[in-house]
Image (cartoon, helix red, strand yellow):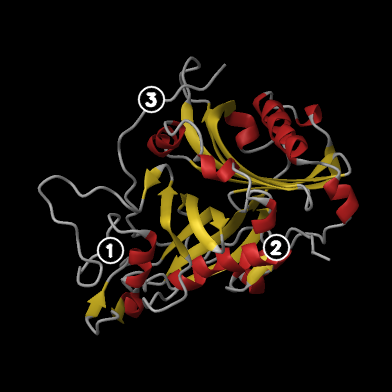
Amino acid sequence: MKLRFASSAAALVCSVGFSGAAVAQSNAVAAIPRPATTTQSRAASCDRACLEGWVDRYFAAATADDPKAIPLAKDVRFTENGQVLPVGEGLWKSMKSAGKYRLAVADPEAGQIALITTVLEDNADPAQGTPALLALRLKVADGRISEIEQVLERNPQTAQRVEALGMPRAAFTTAIPAAQRMSRAALIETANKYFTGMQRNDGKGDYPFSPRCDRIENGGRSTNVPTPAGETRPDPKTARGYSGQWSCLEQFQSGLLYFVSRIRDRRYVAVDQERGVVAVFAFFDHMAGSTRDFTRPDGTLTTAGPAQPWTWEILEIFKVENSQLAEIEAFLTRPPYGMLSGWSTWENGMSDKIQDVTGYRER
C-alpha cells in the first residue's frame, strides 16, 4: 500500500509551553551505548546506494513486523523516542507503510545514514492510517544493522505538511565541486555555529548564513515567510517579537532567541562531504523563569520565550556551501523537559560540546 497524504497549507508555528521532568542521571548512565567496533574499512564498504538500500530493507521488515527479515547484529541496539526497546516493538507493531518524502544524509565512511521521512501507522480503521513524522538513524557494520535510533512526532497534520513537500530541496542532493569540498571537521564546525549562535543568542555572534539561507521546520517555512497583504514587515532591529518573515541572519541578529537556554547532546551522526550536508541530533532546552528576561542588542529590556520549562528534540540537517549555511531542514518533537537520547552519558547529554559520534576520523 502506498501512503497518500492530503496536502496542507498550514504553516508551522513553533509555540512553546510544555513542562516535564528531567531524566535521572542513574537511568541515563544505564543507557550508555557500547563503543563502536566497526573499522573504517568495513564501514566504507557500504556506499551511499547501499545505505539507502538498508533504509528500504528496514522499512520493509518493520512494515511486515518481522525483525528476522533483515540482518541484525547480535548485539543490535534499538531506541524509539529515547527508550531502549527490543527490535520488533514500538513502530514495528504499528507501521502500515513508508511515505514518499525522504531527506537522507548518507555517511559511507562511518557506515551511518540519518533521515527525515514520513510513515503511515495503523489506526482503528484498517482501510485508513495515521500519518507520522519520523527521524531515523541506522548504523551498518559487517553487513548487518548494529544501531537503530528513531524518533517519532505523532502529529498527523505535521506529517501531512512534510509529505506535501513532495521531495527535498535540490541543494541537499547536489554535489559540491571537488575543489570546493570541505573537510568533515570543517563541515561540523560550520554547522555547530548555528547552535552556538542560537544558544543565549545576543545578536553579536558568528552567524555564517548564506544570503539565500532558508529553513524548514516540520514541513513549514520558518524563515523568509512572505509578509501578509496589508501588513508591514517587522523590523528585525526594533520588533518586539520574533518573526518568521525574517531571513536566517536577521533572526539571529535580532537577539530575540536568547531564551534558548541550552542546546545540548549535539551528536553529529552523518556527514556527507560530497554534497556538503551534515545531520545532527540535539536537544533545545528553554529553562523558563528568569531566563526569559534579557537585553536586546539595542539595549531594550525584553521578556520572551516559554513560561514553563520546555525541550525540543531535533534532527537538524544543514547544507553547507563555501563555509556558509545555505539550506536548513529540521525535524522537531516535544519530549519531557531535560530528556536524554538514550545514546549518551548523562554528562555528554547535558553538554553543549560537539560530539562527532560517527566513529570516523580523517587522516
Q: Secondary structure at mark 2?
A: loop
How packed is label 2: few (under 14 Cα within 10 Å), some, or many (20 or more)?
some
Mark 1 or 3, which is nearer the eye? 1
Q: Which residue sits furthest left?
A: 230
Placement of 253 over or under 152, stated as above or below: below
How packed is label 3: few (under 14 Cα within 10 Å), some, or many (20 or more)?
few
Mark 1 or 2, which is nearer the eye? 2
Q: Which residue is mark 2?
A: 183
Residue 336 is tagged as none
Describe residue 32's horizontal placement relative to residue 258 as left or right.
right
Nearest to the observer: residue 344 or residue 99: 99
Of pointers 1 and 2, the one earlier in the residue sequence: 2
Where the N terminus falls, by quadrant?
A: top right
- The residue under the point 57% across, 66% down is 190
Residue 330, image x, y percentages = 49, 50
Q: Secondary structure at mark 1?
A: loop
- The residue under the point 50% across, 33% down is 167
Residue 140, image x, y percentages = 80, 44
How packed is label 1: few (under 14 Cα within 10 Å), some, or many (20 or more)?
some
Tell me, yes or no, whether the two marked residues, 2 and 3, touch with CB atoms within 8 Å: no
The span from disc 1 to disc 2 (Cα, nearest Å) is 34 Å
The span from disc 2 to disc 3 (Cα, nearest Å) is 41 Å
Nearest to the observer: residue 128 or residue 86: 128
Can the viewer see residue 271 in this picture?
yes
Q: Secondary structure at mark 3?
A: loop
Amino acid identity at mark 1: Tyr
Please count the marks in the image: 3
- The residue under the point 69% across, 66% down is 185
Of pointers 1 and 3, the one earlier in the residue sequence: 3
Residue 242 is tagged as 1
Residue 6 is tagged as 3
Can the viewer see residue 38 in this picture?
no
